[in-house]
Image: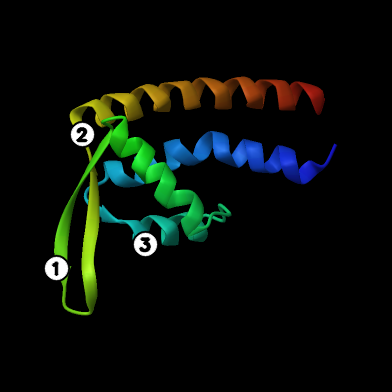
Amino acid sequence: MKIENTQVQMRKGILEYCILKIISRGEVYASDILEELTEAKMIVVEGTVYPLMTRLKNAGLVEYRWEESTSGPPRKYFKLTKEGESFTDQLGKTWDELQQSTTYIVKKADQ
């Protein structure tokens, strides 16, 4: 079994939550999402983020608006819907529970 495969699966599992949390702070442009994920050392590429953004939109969790740009094509800005806010809150509770459980198990194993 390759460690890289497991690492990728772990990242995929939290990527959606991280993106929703970034958007939860207010309207955001997709390249800003990529930049923040990169700064956080989450290894992602545009080819991963854009399809995920489409799935989140189709699920009714995010919406977007177009804004003209003075330096290129129009930009798509994303924000959470009410349903997206509730979904993100629920994921946050799940994340907290998983983090506590994982920390408990890891600390116990390290004793």
Front residue of 18 and 51: 51
Quadrant where the N terminus lies? top right
Left or right position of 42 against 49 = right
Residue 21 seen anywhere in this rendered image of the structure: no
Residue designated by label 3: 31
Furthest residue to the right?
Answer: 1
Question: What distance separates the C-alpha of mark 1 from that of mark 2?
Answer: 22 Å
Front residue of 99 and 24: 24
Name the spot of residue 54 as percent of width and height, x first.
35, 43
> What's the amino acid at mark 3?
Ser
Q: Residues within 10 Å of mark 2 (few under 14, many from 20)?
A: some
At horizontal 52% and vertical 36% (from top left) the residue drawn is: 14
Q: Which of marks 1 and 2 is in front?
A: 1
Residue designated by label 2: 81
Residue 105 seen anywhere in this rendered image of the structure: yes
Q: Quadrant of residue 81?
A: top left
Residue designated by label 1: 68
Name the spot of residue 84 as percent of width and height, x first.
27, 31
Question: What distance separates the C-alpha of mark 3 from that of mark 2?
Answer: 20 Å
At horizontal 51% and vertical 20% (from top left) the residue drawn is: 97
Residue 12 numbered mark, or none = none
Left or right position of 85 against 7 = left
> What's the amino acid at mark 2?
Thr
Label 2's element? loop
First reached walking from the N terminus: tag 3 or tag 2: 3
Left or right position of 56 against 106 = left
Name the spot of residue 71 as percent of width and height, x first.
22, 79
Are discs 1 and 3 less than 8 Å apart at CB?
A: no
